[in-house]
Amino acid sequence: MSKIIESLNWRYASKRMNGRKVPADKVNNILEAIRLAPSSMGLQPYTVLVIEDPELRKQIQPIAFNQPQIVESSHLLVFAAWDNVTPDHINEYISHTATVRNMPEENLADFKNTLLRMAENNTQEQNHTWAAKQAYIAFGTALLAAAAEQVDATPMEGFDNAKLDELLHLKEKGLRSVTLMPLGYRDASNDWLAALPKVRRQKEKLFIVS
């Protein structure tokens, strides 16, 4: 069995965590996997907030319907998508690409114009929806990276987005929260789900091979 499959069989959505700190090198590996995750056109239209502060996580817990992992985890990742895709975002991305690849920005003019047309032809809400979909790709990559590091990670959509955005001042940053991911270690003795078999759809129902 490959390491990836072993890691995916090991992971589950932990309902309780034991408060033990995740070592910095493991957290950094998970964050680097997020940074390297693919996104449409490479734009990465999202920001990930890494929240370790226990007091701030206590304020977030009621916003997340009092789910215990918020405060029992070591770190809380907040995936926040851009509220809109603006010319400033695109100009910064093109400039950064030219610097990294050691080429003149003029060589990227066609690519830049494609991005600008895409952003301009969509409404703000359409741009945000697109950005949120890209954030989910990074989110899935983070789940796999955490499993590979033997760190528990719980995917969460159960929270009040508007209240969290207000608490974290995301609107001022041009962001809207999309998903949460507590990172930590499972408390198997207090988690009813820990010992149960993993349930997934049968291969013959999930896949259509032609």
Image: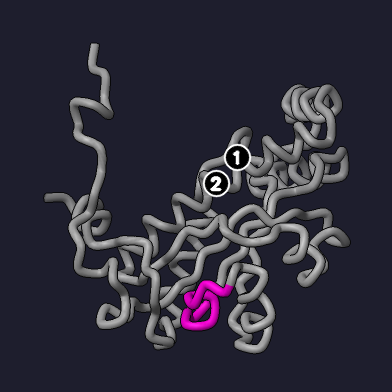
Q: Residue at x 69, y 43 (%)?
A: 97
Q: Residue at x 36, y 78 (%)?
A: 185
Q: Position of residue 201 (x, y in %)?
A: 25, 37
- Seen in the picture, residue 12 relative to 41 is either above or below; the reply is below
Q: Residue at x 80, y 30 (%)?
A: 119
Mark 1, Cα crowd under 10 Å, few <14 / some 14-19 / many 20+, is some
Residue denoted by label 2: 136
Whether residue 69 is in magenta: the answer is yes
Q: How many numbered discs sit on the rendered protein?
A: 2
Amino acid type of disc 1? Lys
Colour scheme employed for the rendering of this structure: one colour
Residue denoted by label 1: 133
Q: Position of residue 155 (x, y in %)?
A: 47, 58
Say what secondary structure mark 2 lies in: helix
Q: Residue at x 24, y 26 (%)?
A: 205
- Seen in the picture, residue 121 relative to 33 is either above or below; the reply is above
**Nearer the observer, 37 or 58:** 58
Q: Position of residue 184 (x, y in %)?
A: 41, 77
Q: Do the residues under discs 2 and 1 have CB atoms within 8 angstroms?
A: yes
Q: Residue 172 vs residue 128: left or right?
A: right
- Residue range highlighted in magenta: 66-75
Say what secondary structure mark 1 lies in: helix
Q: Position of residue 64 (x, y in %)?
A: 61, 68
Residue 7 picture quarter: bottom left
Amino acid type of disc 2? Tyr
Direction top: furthest residue: 210
